[in-house]
């Protein structure tokens, strides 16, 4: 008997280890395989039992459910997992193996299509590799949405004795967990993507900058790098090709601002994590002053798919200039939270009401914050907005890392606007005045609005304009998005407190 149980952090937090202990006690002869999560967090811990070659799901499982799961009488039986509506409706490309394979089995990885992309790339010139990425239309999945191929081209064309690939795994946005799930559930795809990037631009060394709050991801990635090095996937002779690429895992110290690429590079060099002024761009003077590709986990982990299936096959998915798939992370006050990978173009309303099932509280949904704590609050009137970089920008929002946090009608949007300013004040690196001082003044100004000061609202608007235009990086520059979207779309939450004061 084969039984699959996630070792993903979310599943562990919901009791997966206790379920595994109960399974081992009840069925010592069974082979228990630990996987990543399928992304249906409301069903975790999800136990999958192989029956006639198909994996049947049971969840959310508890230790007391084990006997019934094993004898087939469980009321928590879900049927074949791949046939579930949540799975059937996805276009799983980047996350195709997550929840399916043993994350630390390179043989399992290869059996499910792993290394096909790298083997193809090994037969290509660097410029051909860069062109393939450009043709795919892949854009930075970490938030900026910058075309990945253009960044790679810049590094490829730069003259230097040493170049670097740096993976930004400092996933600090609230409501985001795709990077963590990928690293815990399919680490070799990230390693493969970084190797291909190195081959493309002429870099022989890579670093994964991984946030300290992810101990499981750190452990899995570290072990995967060791396995890759031992098997010849990493090192001086990648898969016997005569081409070199090696990499290291580096642990961050917990600064939110180190998700910004230049702060990350400073931290990686052992310096204080503060923003660098640009230019020079990291693509020309990045890590240790050398040309450096800095890409997000999902961006790099998608590269093997592009080389396995072909750039055009990937580009055929999507909407407008947003090509391929988006990894939606649905969280907050929502009935069905989890990770859902689909082509760009799905509307915000479909994600929240159809996939997410509305609010967990049963109250009407009031707003959805898309893109982490610096994302705009989107009201129900904007729910017909399709998920696409330009489409969201035109609607006054940003996709960011594609995390969606749902709020019901009990939420005080003035309080959420205040939280955005307070968050910025706490997390600011202090390098620039608009962010360092502006966020503190923002908290004070919103408190004045709450006390009924009629002059404070225009002042808040001016302050947000200053922060947006004058901040060195997105922390100060994007904080106005949640603040002003709350003011614009939910004026009653600001006016009612003023009226109460009067």
Image (cartoon, rainbow, N blue to C red):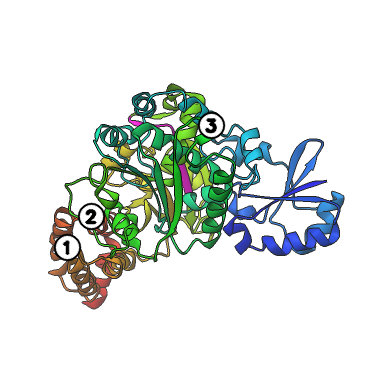
Mark positioned earlier in the residue sequence (1 or 3): 3
Q: Residue at x 21, y 77 (%)?
A: 502
Q: Horizontally, is 398 left or right of 451 in the view?
A: right
Q: CA distance from mark 1 to mark 3?
A: 48 Å
Label 1 environment density (alpha carbons within 10 Å; few <14, some 14–19, many ≥20): some
The residue that disc 2 covers is: 473
441 relative to 195, above or below = below
Kindly state the secondary structure of the residue where label 3 is placed: helix
Mark positioned earlier in the residue sequence (2 or 1): 1
Q: Overall secondary structure of the magenta stretch?
A: strand
Q: Residue at x 56, y 52 (%)?
A: 184
Judge whether residue 225 can be spotted in this image: yes
Q: Horizontally, is 434 left or right of 429 in the view?
A: left
Q: Are marks 1 and 3 in contact (CB under 8 Å)?
A: no
Foreground residue among 265 and 67? 265
Question: Mark 1 or 3, which is nearer the eye?
Answer: 3
Q: Position of residue 13 (x, y in %)?
A: 60, 63
Q: Position of residue 379 (x, y in %)?
A: 35, 51
Q: Horizontally, is 164 left or right of 289 in the view?
A: right
The residue that disc 1 covers is: 432
Kindly state the secondary structure of the residue where label 2 is placed: loop
Q: Position of residue 229 (x, y in %)?
A: 54, 45
Mark positioned earlier in the residue sequence (2 or 3): 3
The residue that disc 3 covers is: 240
Q: Are marks 2 and 1 in contact (CB under 8 Å)?
A: yes
Q: CA distance from mark 2 to mark 3?
A: 42 Å
Q: Horizontally, is 127 left or right of 282 in the view?
A: right
Foreground residue among 5 and 231? 231
Q: Position of residue 204 (x, y in %)?
A: 39, 40
Question: Mark 2 or 3, which is nearer the eye?
Answer: 3
41 relative to 25, above or below = above
Give the residues drawn in magenta, as a range: 321-329
């Amino acid at each position: 008997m084969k039984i699959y149980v996630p070792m993903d952090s979310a599943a562990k937090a919901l009791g997966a280890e206790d379920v595994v202990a109960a399974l081992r006690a009840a069925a010592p002869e069974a082979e228990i395989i630990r996987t990543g999560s399928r992304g249906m967090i409301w069903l975790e811990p999800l136990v999958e039992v192989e029956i006639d070659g198909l994996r049947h799901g049971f969840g959310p499982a508890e230790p007391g459910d084990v006997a019934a799961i094993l004898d087939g009488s469980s009321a928590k039986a879900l049927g074949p997992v791949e046939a579930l509506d949540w799975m059937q409706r996805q276009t799983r490309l980047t996350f195709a193996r997550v929840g399916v394979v043993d994350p630390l089995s390179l043989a399992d990885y290869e059996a499910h299509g792993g290394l096909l992309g790298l083997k193809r790339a090994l037969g290509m010139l660097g410029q051909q590799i860069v062109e393939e990425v450009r043709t795919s239309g892949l854009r930075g999945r970490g938030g900026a949405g910058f075309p990945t191929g253009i960044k790679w081209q810049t590094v490829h064309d730069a003259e230097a004795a040493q170049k670097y690939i740096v993976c930004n795994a400092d996933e600090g946005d609230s409501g985001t967990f795709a990077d963590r799930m990928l690293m815990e559930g399919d680490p070799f795809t990230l390693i493969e993507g970084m190797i291909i990037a190195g081959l493309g631009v002429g870099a022989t060394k890579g670093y994964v900058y991984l946030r300290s709050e992810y101990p499981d991801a750190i452990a899995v990635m570290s072990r995967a790098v060791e396995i890759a090095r031992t098997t010849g996937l990493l090192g001086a002779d990648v898969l016997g090709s005569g081409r070199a690429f090696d990499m290291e895992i580096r642990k961050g110290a917990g600064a939110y601002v180190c998700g910004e690429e230049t702060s990350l590079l400073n931290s990686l060099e052992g310096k204080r994590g503060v923003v660098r002024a640009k230019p020079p761009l990291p693509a020309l003077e990045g890590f240790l002053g050398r040309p450096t590709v800095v890409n997000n986990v999902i961006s790099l982990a998608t590269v093997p798919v592009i080389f396995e299936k072909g750039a055009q096959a990937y580009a055929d998915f999507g909407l407008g200039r947003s090509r391929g798939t988006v990894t939606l992370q649905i969280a907050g006050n929502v009935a069905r939270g989890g990770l859902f990978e689909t082509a760009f173009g799905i509307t915000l309303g479909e994600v929240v009401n159809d996939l997410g099932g509305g609010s967990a509280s049963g109250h009407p949904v009031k707003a959805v914050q898309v893109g982490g704590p610096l994302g705009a609050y989107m009201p129900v009137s904007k729910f017909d907005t399709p998920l696409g970089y330009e489409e969201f920008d035109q609607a006054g929002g940003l996709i960011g890392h594609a995390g969606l946090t749902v709020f019901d009608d009990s939420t005080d949007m003035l309080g959420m606007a205040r939280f955005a300013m307070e968050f910025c004040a706490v997390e600011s690196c202090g390098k620039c005045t608009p962010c360092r001082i502006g966020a503190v003044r923002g908290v004070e100004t919103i408190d004045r609005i709450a006390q009924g000061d009629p002059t404070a609202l225009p002042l808040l608007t001016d302050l947000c304009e200053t922060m947006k235009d004058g901040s060195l990086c997105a922390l100060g520059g994007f904080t106005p998005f949640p603040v002003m979207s709350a003011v614009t779309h939910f004026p009653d939450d600001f006016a009612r407190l003023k009226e109460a004061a009067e």
